[in-house]
Image (spheres, rainbow, N blue to C red):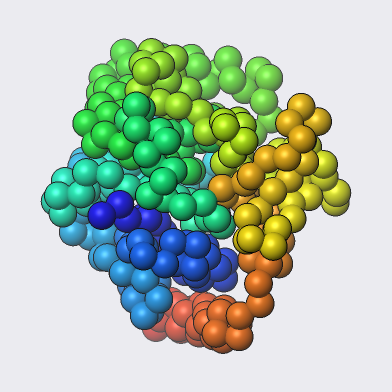
Amino acid sequence: MIPIIFIHNQNSDYLPLSLWQARKSNPETEVILIGDAGNAHFKHLVTHVDKTQYLKRADDFAKKFVNFSTNSHDFELICLQRWFILEEYLRQNNIEKCLYLDSDILLFGNVKSEIHRFRFFGMTIAGISGHSNYINDIEVLSEFCQYIEKAYESPEAISILEEKYKVFRETHEAGGISDMTFFVEFKEEFPDHIIDIGIPIQGKMYDISMNYFEYMHNTGGIKIVNQSKNGEVFLRHAKHPLINMQTLHFQGDTKVHMKRHLFTYSFALDVIYYANKLFILYQKAWKKTLGKFFR
């Protein structure tokens, strides 16, 4: 079994879209959402797992973490913690391989055949991000987690991160030290451990981001992609005539385009999607009410 795994906190209006598409594109593959009470209602769509069972290392890491980013402390911490949660989940459930996806990704490729293509590498990245990560070797994931921990293990290590952040901010308005930083450095140190699938390989590619379109046909700030009659999703590229897209990544503001890129209309998905939007309003109202009660 090679499951597709998402890790998501609370609820989001786009979450059912990625879960639905993962199931649709890989109907014989188990789709797992490692989440919390805020998204437990998706247990009727995919396998829902309570993340609190897999937080030991993530919680230990939180005590050491120092934020060197313009993004919030919680945001950057969660982005790093997910790799500890994923490793702990895989080990406790004796799962050797999986595809990890961020929850703003639509999957079109076949996981079983695709993970075999990358069998000589322990993990994958798209560009500089692990948002489409085929875990082929859990020991490589473990090494990566240890690599992150080591970066925060002492005052000297923290000083190194602080200096890197200062250098980064000299040329960047936003961002900082993140899990992407560690993916880049880990790949540089262990090039045989990770392969970048955000570039065309054998005519196939995993999307770095829909608003990253160098050499690609685009309009309105996102890539132009189409679906062929056989269901494959493709785009045109200046250097490669036609690229078969295995994923589409709707990072940041591009999430508003996510629903229309499912291509095939489904009444059942519409029901789930709009019911979830109403549920989000209910969750917000309930949270606000509780806040007043305990004030």
Q: Is residue 59 visible?
A: no
Task: In this rendered view, identify the residue nearer to me: 36 or 293.
Answer: 36
* Picture mark count: 0
For image coordinates 77% across by 41% down, the residue present is 236
For image coordinates 55% across by 85% down, the residue present is 268
- Residue 67 is situated, as x and y percent measured from the top left of the image, at 44, 34
For image coordinates 68% across by 40% down, the residue present is 243
Question: Residue 70, located in which quarter of the rendered image?
Answer: top right
Task: In this rendered view, identify the residue nearer to me: 143 or 282.
Answer: 143
- Residue 146 is situated, as x and y percent measured from the top left of the image, at 25, 27
Q: Is residue 153 above or below residue 8?
A: above
- Farthest residue toward the right? 219
Q: Is residue 289 left or right of residue 35?
A: right
Q: Is residue 204 above or below residue 5?
A: above
- Residue 139 is situated, as x and y percent measured from the top left of the image, at 22, 31
- Residue 226 is situated, as x and y percent measured from the top left of the image, at 74, 55
For image coordinates 68% across by 67% down, the residue present is 263
Task: In this rendered view, identify the residue nearer to me: 57 or 132.
Answer: 132
Quarter of the image with the N terminus is: bottom left
Q: Is residue 132 visible?
A: yes
